[in-house]
Image (cartoon, rainbow, N blue to C red):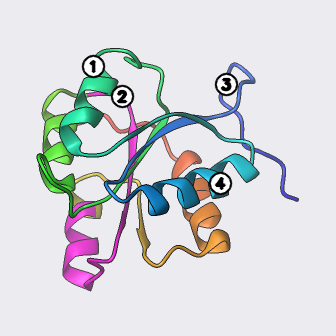
Amino acid sequence: MQQIKRRGDGQPFRGIICEDKKQEAMKMRQILESRGYGILGIAENGRELMQMLTGEYKNQADFVVLDIIMPVLDGYAAFTEIRDAKLPVRIIFASVENSRAVMESVMQLGASGFITKPLDRDVVLEKIDKALSTPVPKWE
């Protein structure tokens, strides 16, 4: 088992999963917790995510795993709101929408990673580990 990456204060990295499909959210949670990452919560849409990031978990999440296709507020819109609010969090998209154009677009806008579904444990951990080795974005 690989050593868990830790924050500067020695604590495990913590994240929020934003996924409208409960089974997918639980699978992602299990994968991340198996590496020792803390999961602060699961949001079912981008609106719930924004409430978590600006309320209960303000400045606590190191990363967000963000689905694209969701009701109420989709992943693109939530990503835009996170950037506009300049929230200090890494965004890793996880979606079935995996065309090269989509992946390149979100990465150019500042996403820290992109995971294609269906979820594969090794790929998820590789992408999350890589994203967490980069600085927190300074949104422009």
Q: Residues within 10 Å of mark 3 (few under 14, many from 20)?
A: few
Q: Which residue is mark 4?
A: 30
Q: CA distance from mark 1 to mark 2?
A: 11 Å
> How far apart are labels 4 and 2 at the CA level?
25 Å
Residue type indicated by callout 3: Gly
Task: State the residue in front, 126 or 35.
Answer: 35
Image depth: mark 1 or mark 3 in front? 1
Residue 118 as seen in the image, left or right of residue 83: right
Instruction: State if disc 2 and disc 1 touch (CB < 8 Å).
Output: no
* Residue in view at x 71 percent, y 34 percent: 6
Tag 1 secondary structure: helix
Binning the other alpha carbons within 10 Å of mark 1 as few (below 14), some (14 to 19) or many (20 upward) gives: some
Give the residue type at disc 1: Thr
Q: Residue at x 39, y 34 (%)?
A: 89
**Circles 3 and 4 in contact, beta carbons < 8 Å:** no
In the rendered structure, find residue 8 and report the number of the disc placed on it. 3
What residue did someone put label 2 on? 88
SS of the residue at dot 3?
loop
Instruction: Estimate the spatial distance between the alpha carbons at disc 2 and disc 3, rounded to whole Å.
Output: 15 Å
Instruction: Give whichever of discs 3 and 4 has the lower sequence position.
Output: 3
- The residue lying toward the viewer, choosing from 107 and 91, is 91
Which type of secondary structure does the marked residue at label 2 adopt? loop
Q: Which residues are magenta?
A: 87-106
26 left or right of 46?
right
Q: Earlier in the sequence, mark 2 or mark 3?
A: 3
Q: Which is more foreground, mark 1 or mark 2?
A: 1
Q: Residue at x 54, y 54 (%)?
A: 26
Distance in Å between CA atoms under marks 3 and 4: 24 Å
